[in-house]
Image (spheres, helix red, strand yellow):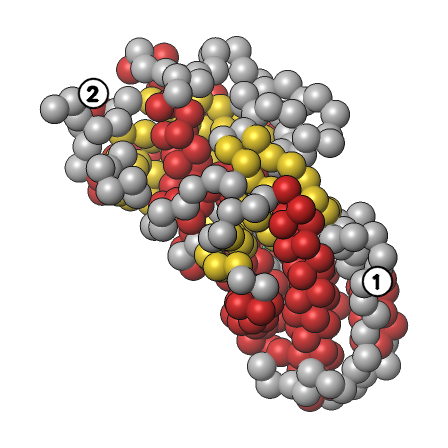
Amino acid sequence: MAEKPIILGIETSCDETAVSLIQDDQTGIPKILSNVISSQFDVHKEFGGVVPELAARSHIEKIDLIAKEAIRESRVNLDKVSAIAATAGPGLIVCLTVGLNFGKAMAMSLNIPFIGVNHLEGHALSPKLHSKLDYPYLLLLISGGHSQYLSVNGLGNYKRLGTTIDDALGEAFDKTAKLLGIEFPGGPKLEKFAQKGNPNKYELPKPIINKGGCNLSFAGLKTAILRITKKIKSDQEKFDLAASFQKTIEDILFIKTKKAFEEFNKFNLQDEKKFVVAGGVAANEGIRKKLIEVSNQNNFQTIFPDLKLCGDNAAMIAMVGLEKYKIKQFDSLDLSANPRLSLDVDAKFLKGAGVKL
Ligand code: KG4
Ligand code: ZN
């Protein structure tokens, strides 16, 4: 029997340098042979956000070491690797270029196919690394740069049902955390803060909650938080504001997800409906609970990526690489990074990484 394909994935779109090797498996769920992630939190902490030039320099310094570690951990000989998949966009151009060029050089020296991957498609397919998941399914992608409801109809085949009209949800978490004096990266820490507070203390706005279909908006929330933080003095008030923010987000997602279910149901008639929640914010426990509740009420089965696959990682990039490898959807070595690569069918044409738009 022919050996199952092995894909080496590379991710450097923002502040994580990551390399992973995965292998196809007869179970339909690939094996993660290694999944090495190096975060740059310490590099950017003092600036309160990601500094692109520093991020790129850190990727350059680390990429070969991370790749070596991932290959060693996987116990795979390089001559057994079937293809190299690297994130081509969206992200910071100076960062994307590091991983993309490293991947192209590897593919060229090993004389194997090179596959450019849309980072968002990586998040979209991330649960396939541990769960059997057939198309179509409804996706809520909530990360630092994106917040979208999409119908995932196939590889490279996405229909947008709703999107944020201003800030991304991860961005709203990070900005609120900053206003509350929580150090970078604030999103995950804000949830811990919220657990010590009263979620009903502050009434916060829920922008476009009764209009705009399943579009989202978080900018008004940030303005309200800014106004309140100017008045609060005690730590307890900060905890209460964090808790009120967390609850407001949960309520917004509950209502908007119900609308997204209705939209999805209009053109998907199958009995078993699946709802995937992916991206960094999908690690939020309160959001997970609330989305399971709304899914149960509407006969959708919720699937979350494992916690270590919610944030940026290279296993999800290799996952997309594996699906593209199976249908021989390869890219040429002159593929360039595209910082604005999109999944939306409604977005205007953006060249690169083979995603149909
Ligand atoms: O998917 P991701 O790792 O990177 C992007 O592609 O953007 O998402 C990062 C975002 C950050 O904004 C981070 O604060 C947020 O996900 N995040 C969280 C949690 N964990 C990560 N937000 C809320 N609660 C969490 N537990
Ligand atoms: Zn991401």
Q: CA distance from mark 2 to mark 1?
A: 56 Å
**Relative depth, front residue between 306 and 91:** 306
Amino acid under label 2? Asp
Report the front residue among 99 and 8. 8
Neighbours of disc 2 within 10 Å: few (<14), some (14-19), many (20+): few
**What residue does disc 2 label?**
79
Looking at the picture, how far across and down is residue 13, in whole percent? 55, 37
Q: Residue drawn 84% across and 77% down?
A: 228
Relative to 317, residue 198 above or below: below
Q: Give me the disc on residue 210.
A: 1
Could you say whether the residue bearing mark 2 is in a helix, strand or loop? helix
- Kindly tell me whether residue 28 is visible in this rendering: yes
Residue 87 in the figure: left or right of residue 20: right
Q: Nearer the viewer, mark 2 or mark 1?
A: 1
Identify which residue, 350 or 171, lies in the foreground. Answer: 350
| Above/below status of 12 relative to 273 | above
